[in-house]
Amino acid sequence: MEPLYSTKLAKKTGSATTQQFLDVLEIKEDIVVLKSGAIRAIIAVSAINYDLKSTQEQEAIINGYQNFLNSLDFPLQILILHYCSFFSH
């Protein structure tokens, strides 16, 4: 899988921009177009509270995820972001 960042180091100049370090040409809706012409899809999913699911539901979730992964015939990168907020009373 091609990285989204450039492996070339930019020269240190006063006019260097972030775009010089990225191999991203443009972003159209949920698609990232790389300078090489390759494309990457971006999807977002919501979380579920796995612990609150019944044993049957948990097994169904695991089997569904396993079937999804086994059906892929291309590289996949999964990024998990965990947002935590604390409220003071």
Image (tube, rainbow, N blue to C red):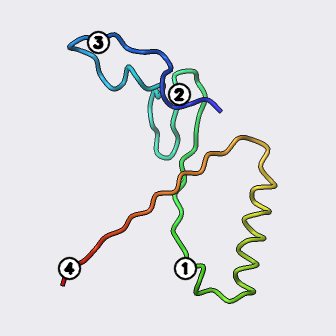
Locate residue 79, reporting x and y percent: 54, 51
Q: Compare marks 4 and 3 and give the one earlier in the sequence.
A: 3
Distance from disc 2 to disc 3, alpha carbons, whole Å, reads 23 Å
Residue corresponding to mark 1 = 49
Nearer mark to the viewer, of 2 and 3: 3
Q: Compare marks 4 and 2 and give the one earlier in the sequence.
A: 2
Distance from disc 1 to disc 2, alpha carbons, whole Å, reads 35 Å
Secondary-structure class at tag 3: loop
Looking at numbered disc 3 in the image, what kind of residue is underneath it? Lys
Distance from disc 3 to disc 1, alpha carbons, whole Å, reads 47 Å
Q: Is residue 79 above or below residue 60?
A: above
Locate residue 62, reporting x and y percent: 73, 71
Distance from disc 4 to disc 1, alpha carbons, whole Å, reads 24 Å
Q: Is residue 22 above or below residue 43?
A: above
Q: Quadrant of the C terminus?
A: bottom left
Secondary-structure class at tag 1: loop
Residue corresponding to mark 4 = 88
Q: Are marks 2 and 3 in contact (CB under 8 Å)?
A: no
Which residue is at 38% across, 19% downward? 20
Nearer mark to the viewer, of 4 and 2: 4
Secondary-structure class at tag 4: loop
The answer to which image quadrant residue 18 occupies is: top left
Residue corresponding to mark 3 = 12
Distance from disc 4 to disc 2, alpha carbons, whole Å, reads 43 Å
Which residue is at 52% across, 70% downward? 47
Looking at numbered disc 2 in the image, what kind of residue is underneath it? Leu
Q: Badge 3: how crowded within 10 Å, few (<14), some, or many (20+)? A: few
Residue corresponding to mark 2 = 34
Report the side of 35 relative to 76 (left or right).
left
Which residue is at 51% across, 58% downward? 44
Distance from disc 4 to disc 3, alpha carbons, whole Å, reads 44 Å
